[in-house]
Every structure is written in structure tokens, then in C-alpha cells.
Image (spheres, rainbow, N blue to C red):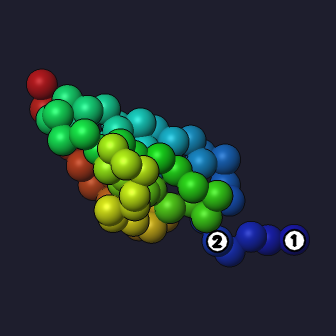
Amino acid sequence: MRLDNAIYQPHIQHNLKAATKFIDQSLKTQGNHLNASLNQHNQIQIRNEDGVVVKTFQGENVVRKMHHIDEYV
């Protein structure tokens, strides 16, 4: 059996968690009172301090774009 959807591959799941953690830490650093979490549909949700979803990103799209970002220190 072949899975065509890359979102179920283990390394993609790891990348989703890493991206969510990075976004969450960035939001906390900026002091916007927002946080990021990964839901059961592999979507990254941005919530305000009241727990209301402000923005939702498709996790698969975020992971694809992650590989095109270079980090400079």
C-alpha cells in the first residue's frame, strides 16, 4: 500500500511539530498574546489569549515552505 499524501510520513509530522513550536515561540517573543498549536487535522492554529482561533494554516503547506527558508545567524 502506497500513501500519496506526504503528511502521514513520520518526518513530515516531526516538521509540523517543529514549525508549530517555532511559530509559538516567535509569537510569545513578540508579546502579541497569541499562541500556536497543531490540531488533529494537521493545521497550525493561531489563537488569541481568549482561545479564539485567529488564523489557521494548512500544515502541509507550511512544511513545504520550510525547506526553502535559510537561517542566517
Residue 40 at x, y = what percent?
A: 64, 58
Q: Which residue is mark 2?
A: 5
Residue drawn at x 32%, y 62% as measured from the top left: 54
Residue drawn at x 79%, y 71% as measured from the top left: 2
Q: What amino acid does circle 2 point to?
A: Asn
52, 9: nearer the viewer: 52
> SS for tag 2?
loop
Residue 48 at x, y = what percent?
A: 32, 50
Q: Quadrant of the N terminus?
A: bottom right
Does residue 19 appear in the picture of this structure? no
Q: What amino acid does circle 1 point to?
A: Met
Residue drawn at x 20%, y 29% as measured from the top left: 29
Residue 13 at x, y = what percent?
A: 60, 48
Count of numbered marks: 2
Any mark on residue 1, and which? 1
Residue 45 at x, y = what percent?
A: 43, 57
